[in-house]
Image: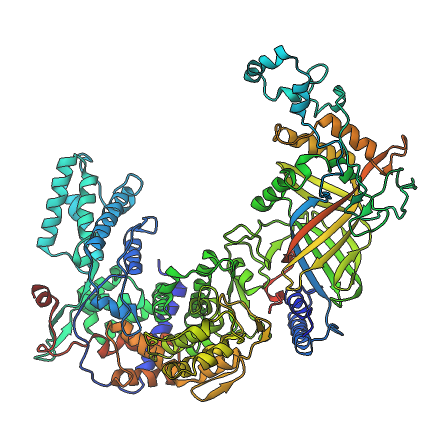
Amino acid sequence: MISTKFKRAVLLAGLALGLAACGPKEPQTAGTPLGIRRLSEEQYRNVVADVFGTGIVVSGRFDPMIRTDGLLAVGAWNTSITPQGLVQYEEMARNIAAQVVSDANREVLIPCKPASAAAYDKVCAEQFFTKVGRLLYRRPMAAEEMTATLKITEAASDSLKNFYDGVGFGLARLLVSPDFLFVSDVAEADPKNAGTQRLNAFSKAARLSFFLWNSAPDDRLLQAAEKGDLYTAKGTEREVARMIASPRLKTGMRAFFSDMYGFDAFNVLEKDATIYPAFGQVAAQDAKEQTLRTITDLVLKQDGDYRDLFTTRKTYMTRPLGRVYEIRVTTPDGVWEPYEFPIESRRAGIQSQLSLLALNSHPGRSSPTLRGKAIRTYLLCQRVPDPPGDVDFSKFGDPDSPNKTARDRLTAHSTMPACAGCHKITDPIGLAMENFDGAGTFRTSEDGTPIDSSGDLDGVRYDDPVGLAKALHDSPAVAACVVNRLASYATGQPTAQSDKWVNFLREDFASNGYRVKNLLQRIATSDAFVAVPPPAAATSTKQASAQ
Amino acid sequence: MDALAPIYVKVLLHLRLPNPGPPVMRATSILKLLCATAAIVLCATPHVGAAEKKTLGFAVTKWNTAVYEGKFMDECPEGLNPSNKDIWWSKLNWEQRRKTPDILATQRSPWNFRGEHGEDVCVAPTSVKDPPLRIVKGGVSFGMNLDGNTDGAATAKTCKHENFTGVDGTAGVDNQMYRLFGCVYAWRSNGHIEQNANSHRLSSGLGMILIEISDVDDMRNDDHVDVTFYRGLDPFATDSAGHVLPFSSYRIDMENGKPRYGDKVAGKIVDGAIVTETGNVHLPFFGNYQYMNQEIRDLRLKLSIAPDGKTAKGDVGGYYSVEQIYRYVSGMLGAFPNTTQFSCPGIYVAAHELADGYPDAKTGECTMLSSAFKLEAVAAFINHPEAKPSQQAAR
């Protein structure tokens, strides 16, 4: 049963959508090229959990994704599966299938009972694969696909003399199928505009779902696609409103911000335990979770101004984090509690939380350069060149150097002409974060010398990390960056700052108080989100496969 | 900058507000306190001035009987003590020794059951007469002058005993616990009794002693602070190497709405070290698979906090019950029959002979041992049940 609260949320989302529709008209765009992208690890796990429940364990290693134009989601359109990766998928598929058909789960997950558990039952098998195949393939299975699947199931059932084991084989086949592992854009002729193409309804449903929920479409969205509702503005708006009102939006936005802020690096984050004993694996995972909670709380639950993420002192805390922040935490281990940093803490904004501080430092010391680069890259969508191959770190890394603080060392290092250019754009930002050591713990001095945390961001000067927070909040690049990244994330294609659609979104974002939910609605309901280039430029998935 | 400035900062940063007031007031108080922190750092002055009262917390990570070891072990001229097993073996004749494997095949720890009628000599220490315990004969010891005199003469609360000279030269140090255990291998620096107990507490969090110092006006010199001892409820937070991490939060153990432990003694701060007056204090204990509700009478504590505020080291003096220490000693022997290196009857007799505090009203015999302990602790946030996130004071 749908709760009153949920209905109200849908209503409000719909109302907001309606109001948003009264704004400036969306510019016409050429659309994004059709493509194929591999499911990310998180998407794979989300889909399995959505279809079969969270009790199904997914264990295995996934091929890494490639970050392209700032996002893994964009890189996903250019990634394939290695032979070793395919072996992993095969093993995972068999393992998942075995769990689904196990004694413990079959009653719930298989919607029918065979005439005999020891023999193949076509009716029951077809019923199961019709339901599951539609959710995994994000469209109804074609007749020939169903026939092939049933054939495998029958052969396995007969051979093993067990219906459920046979179904397991059939299911494993679906789970290693490219139709499951890859999200394919499929275009069709647009009947309303002769000579043009449009995404077909199921591709649009998948694009919406992976954008907002980071998972495959649910049954209702697929129904909307089947009924043709997603071809109409009204039908699309209704579904988008429902999806934005859903608690699953949080999952989607956690995935987006994890991607945007480079949180995949947490998988390989290591700190020197001798120098930062409190920053272990638990603290690292909690640090990531803390920032994601801060973000989703502000931009989704509070529906607040995105820019406030860089000045907010409100967050959540656990004991492992408390030990690194060196603050009292009243709740027991494993429990999150709301927390607000005091003004004098000099912590304001997510850039002053452990996640971004520790992630963009060295294992045993802070790094104003890495931190500055991270702010430029992740928060401002700016490109910082890699250091030259023959860079001389001797002045910076000299343990006997008289330069006690990072500022002193960097000043000596960046006098070298080859280094000066980049350091000028990173260090004034990163040096403002030097009050936080390599793990993110507050400090007032380094090696006995007081820390000067002044700096400037594109001409705006500040004296400390709080000043940097305000400068970030007020920087037009911050809001522009999230618009750009969301647009790229939604379509899977890099978007230029000069893109007409992005400009339109940026203005819309500003006029709506920098509310991310509004921005999501605007993107998901815009024509550009699903626009396909003219047939000459576009290549359908089928054609691509053939090539 | 004053060398002690970092400690002021740390101290202020893990303070706890004394009385929860309305939220606005609490916020104001936090603001004031943190402003005071800034003022201290900037001005590098050792005086907090009119700052709010502060509260410090520490979790005890090591609790050891203070045993002074001379360079040539000359405090133990007779050598270290034999174990229950050694004594049992020494009394066997050749034939009995030859049959030892047969005995061990049918009886566990036969050396414990060598009472006149086969009693367990740890349960019934008077059932056999063992050689006297080899006790400390040296003249130097850790500890404090608990009874106020330097000649060891009996007082209203003490029995006649022999005093030590402190390692730091203090005259009249009372430490009969050291005299009792100082020549027992298990209590010395390489012995495992104290190491085991510390390790058991570290891994389980059981018997954790929390020390809260409240009513602090000035971290350098303060003529009055309160020192309260609690039992912690949460396990120790450790790093990957097993070291206890500072600045973790610990709940105190409660019973019927009140702290299960919570004895308080008055104290003062002298040149940055916390020194308490005397008071009877109950402390939790777990170690060597045994729990104890330790009572230390006339306890006094001297606690020195490291310059970075993360750790502290302390000395504890006081009178410890003979009955309590014997119960601990005899109980652990079941767990470590081979390696404890003492005999229960020997300990029992010597402990009663050496007792120098709190004479029994009827017999006049003293019932407690003057004692000294050394502790190590890490800075901790001690969470009282009423503590709410809004009360948190942070850097």
- Quarter containing the C terminus of chain A: bottom left
Q: Position of residue B184 (x, y in %)?
A: 70, 34
B77 or B267: which is nearer to us? B77
Q: Position of residue A123 (x, y in %)?
A: 14, 44
Residue found at x 57% / y 56%: B245
- Quarter containing the N terminus of chain A: bottom left
Q: Given the current orientation, which residue lies at the most extreme bottom position?
A: A459
Q: Position of residue A234 (x, y in %)?
A: 24, 75
A314 or A239: which is nearer to us? A314
Residue found at x 59% / y 59%: A330
B268 or A422: which is nearer to us? A422
Residue found at x 41% / y 65%: A5
For the image, the number of numbered tags is 0
Is residue A26 visible in this depiction of the protein?
no
Q: Given the current orientation, which residue lies at the most extreme top position?
A: B95
A342 with respect to B51 (left or right)? left
B171 or A424: which is nearer to us? B171
Q: Position of residue A542 (x, y in %)?
A: 9, 65
